[in-house]
Every structure is written in C-alpha cells, then in structure tokens.
Image (cartoon, rainbow, N blue to C red):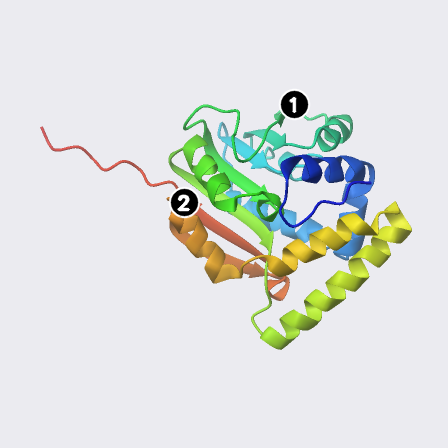
C-alpha cells in the first residue's frame, strides 16, 4: 500500500487513504480508545449548525462526522480527495442531507461564499499547504460565517508531549499492523502529528489566512485541539 511522505504530495496522500478506507473508522476507534466519538460530538457542538444552514465538511473521509452536522436540519457537503473514502461513505452513510463531493482543499470546487460553516477534522495537517487550504475555506464561507478546525495537537507539558509522541510513533503502527496490515500509513500519520504546530502557532496561521475571532479549546488534555474563527463581515457603508 502507498505510504505518503512528509512532503504530502496529493496523489500519494489520496492513494494512502484509498487503501485505508475499508477499515478507517474501525482503526480510528481502536487507536483513539473511543475518544474519536467524543471529539466528533465536541466539533458538532462547536459548529452548532442550525436549521437551513449549509455546512462544508472537508477531509470528511467516509462522512461519519458529516452526519452529525445535519441533526438540527442543516445540510452538509462531505468533501474529500480520496475517492475510496467517499465511496465507502456513500455505502455506509446514505443520509438525505449529506452530499458527497470529491475535491482538493487547495482548490475547492465551490463558488465564493457558499457555506455558513466550514469544518475540517484531522485533515488540515495532511494538506501540502495548510495556509492555502485555510484561504480557500475563507473564500467559500459567507461573510460572518464560521470555521472549525479539529486537529491533533500538543500537550502543554513538553516532557509529557514527547512521551506521548514516542508512544504514538510505536503503538499506532503496531495496532494498525494487526488490524489493517499497513503500519506504514500509520507511521506517516504519527510523523505528521509530531511535526504539526502547537495550538498557538496554528491560531496564528489561521489569522494569517484572513480569519478573525480566533480561539481554541483543548480536548483530551491537548492531544486534540479545536480552533474556531469567523470570516470578517464587510464593514457597513457610509450613512446616506
């Protein structure tokens, strides 16, 4: 199976996830000890999609997260560049208010200002250019709309963070070998997590892309962080 490298060439990353599609949700559940369900619920609460709103779920994979955004009457576009993931998602999550669309986060196939909220969970670090991806998310979000980024992060205590990442680097591939016979893909994922910026640095990157009102919340002691922001609304025109 393809094992992507840290330069994150889109074709290699997509092929790697195509190969994982069949057992991706199971592996996430096992490797996170069930915490992935808690993370999805937290993201859904923070996105707070309302009736009639339109949500874009990027790096949606099989669409497991996308379904949660429609509970209150919103519609969701589940977008991913792995066709294998999308095909698996269509088979498992045939939900009326979820549409599956193939697309690259660096060049989204949507017109400007189409969505009330854009969210990406555990996918921003797999893009070749996170800054460009964040700028694309800004482009397709309506003025005043919101961004929610859920991503692996860093524990606030440096020593504990190093221990955690060592354990992730050895334990993840070992479990993946038993369940999916593909430790290489999960070694890549462990490497991208270790190389990813911490909470404050990611907040700066989001701000550089043009988002405002940036804040974050740590989940599971900082193993995961959820950042939220808004697209600035246009300034009011002069009084007539």
Residue assigned mark 1? 96
The answer to which quarter of the image holds residue 120 is top right
| Residue at x 79%, y 57% (from the top left corner) | 172
- Closest to the observer: 234 or 195? 195
The answer, for residue 22, to whether it is visible in the render is yes
x and y, in percent, of residue 20 in the image? 79, 40
Give SS at disc 2: loop
Q: Name, please, the residue furthest toward the left.
A: 240
- Closest to the observer: 25 or 5? 5
- Closest to the observer: 24 or 218? 24
Q: Which mark is residue 84?
A: none
x and y, in percent, of residue 87 in the image? 75, 27
> Up-down: is 117 above or below 45?
above
Which-is-in-front pick, marks 1 and 2? 2
| Residue at x 49%, y 55% (from the top left corner) | 202
x and y, in percent, of residue 61 in the image? 68, 36
Q: Residue 209 carries which label?
A: 2
The answer, for residue 34, to whether it is visible in the render is no
> In what quadrant of the picture does the C terminus appear?
top left
| Residue at x 37%, y 44% (from the top left corner) | 210
The answer to which quarter of the image holds residue 220 is bottom right
x and y, in percent, of residue 150 in the image? 57, 50
The reply to whether dot 1 and dot 2 touch (C-beta < 8 Å) is no
Q: How far apart in space, not on screen, are marks 1 and 2 (Cα)? A: 33 Å
């Amino acid at each position: 199976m393809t094992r992507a490298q840290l330069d994150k060439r889109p074709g290699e990353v997509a092929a790697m996830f195509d190969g994982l599609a069949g057992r991706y949700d199971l592996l996430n559940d096992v490797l996170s000890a069930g915490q992935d369900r808690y993370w999805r619920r937290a993201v859904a609460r923070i996105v707070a999609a309302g009736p009639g709103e339109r949500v874009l779920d990027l790096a949606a994979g099989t669409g497991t997260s996308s379904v949660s955004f429609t509970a209150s009457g919103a519609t969701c576009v589940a977008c991913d560049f792995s066709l294998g993931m999308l095909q698996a998602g269509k088979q498992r999550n045939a939900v009326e208010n979820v549409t599956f669309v193939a697309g690259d986060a660096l060049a989204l196939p949507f017109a400007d200002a189409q969505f009330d909220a854009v969210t990406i969970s555990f996918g921003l670090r797999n893009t070749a250019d996170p800054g460009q991806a964040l700028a694309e998310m800004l482009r397709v979000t309506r003025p005043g709309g919101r961004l929610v980024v859920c991503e692996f992060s860093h524990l606030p205590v440096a020593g504990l963070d190093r221990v955690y990442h060592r354990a992730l680097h050895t334990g993840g591939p070992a479990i993946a070998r038993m369940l999916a016979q593909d430790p290489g893909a999960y070694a890549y994922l462990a490497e991208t997590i270790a190389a990813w910026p911490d909470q404050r640095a990611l907040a700066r990157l989001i701000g550089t892309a043009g988002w405002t009102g940036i804040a974050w919340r740590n989940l599971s002691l900082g193993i995961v962080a959820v950042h939220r922001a808004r697209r600035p609304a246009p300034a009011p025109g002069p009084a007539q």
